[in-house]
Amino acid sequence: MARCTARIRRLAVKHITPDKLENSLVRSIALHEAVMELAESFEPYPELHFELAFQSALLSMEHATAALLLMQNEMEASGMALLRPQFESLVRAFWLMYAATETQVEKLSMPLTIETARRGDDLPMLSEMLKLLEGVPEAPAHIVTQLQDYKEVTWKALNSFTHGGIHPLSKFVTGYPPKLVFDTLCNSNGIFMMAAQLLCITTGVPENQFHWRELVDEFADCFHPTSKPV
């Protein structure tokens, strides 16, 4: 019986009606509002790498909310183009929290000038940050694995949407099927909640993660089973 129920749910997710997509957009907006209400009083632990990780996680969440609003207003190409910076900002946040050296953290904390921008050119890119996180025992291994899996599955499409490649150009002709928008929304929500989880971690207050977990459970319908934050 359990296998049959799981199969029915998988089949239902394969067929997304416009009404189902509209409901998912409404639920996703409610999710974003609930998370921001939770995080409104958050302050990072007063150490530089906590503070920068906190800022980078907030940047990722801002990209997610902007993508959601664009997709709600049927500007799917622009919304989907934000999923790459949403993901990159999240990986940067985890790298700052767990793997960056003091020198690297200091570089990213400096006021923006021509000189400091030039000095930041040698900071690691996405693949290297993920590799570094993999080698840090303190970094949550299950989250690092989720980040690596997400990159492996989505990276070509993310690049295509960000750089005006074949994915967005073809969709101008064929349109955006509800299933594609739904899948993108669920992926973005998963990354959004991982950023929210890191916000909780950077406060240094363990109870904050209990409230985060409550929201993950309350809004379980906003995530794919394979991308649900854990």
Image (cartoon, grey):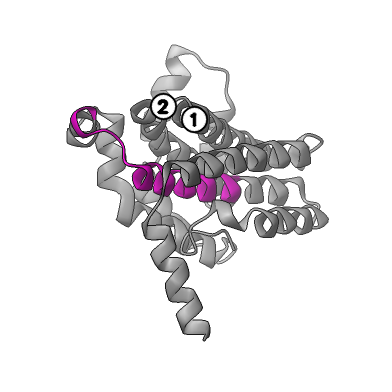
Q: CA distance from mark 2 to mark 1?
A: 6 Å
What secondary structure is marked by label 1?
helix
127 relative position to 108: left or right: left
126 relative position to 220: left or right: left
Residue 65 in the image: above or below residue 126? above
Residue 118: image location, x then y, percent: 39, 21
Q: Visible in this render: residue 175?
A: yes
Is residue 210 highlighted in magenta? no
Q: Which mark is residue 72?
A: 1
On the rendered image, what quadrant is the C terminus found in?
bottom right
What secondary structure is marked by label 2?
loop
At label 2, counting other C-alpha atoms closer than 10 Å, the crowd grade (few under 14, some 14-19, many 20 or more) is few
Determine the residue positioned at 48% across, 49% down.
Answer: 186
- Location of mark 2 (residue): 74
Amino acid type, callout 1: Gln
Residue 93 in the image: above or below residue 15? above
Which range is magenta? 172-195
- Tell me whether circle 2 and circle 1 mark residues in contact (CB < 8 Å): yes
Residue 30 in the image: above or below residue 149? above
Residue 213: image location, x then y, percent: 71, 59
Amino acid type, callout 2: Glu
Q: Visible in this render: residue 46?
A: no
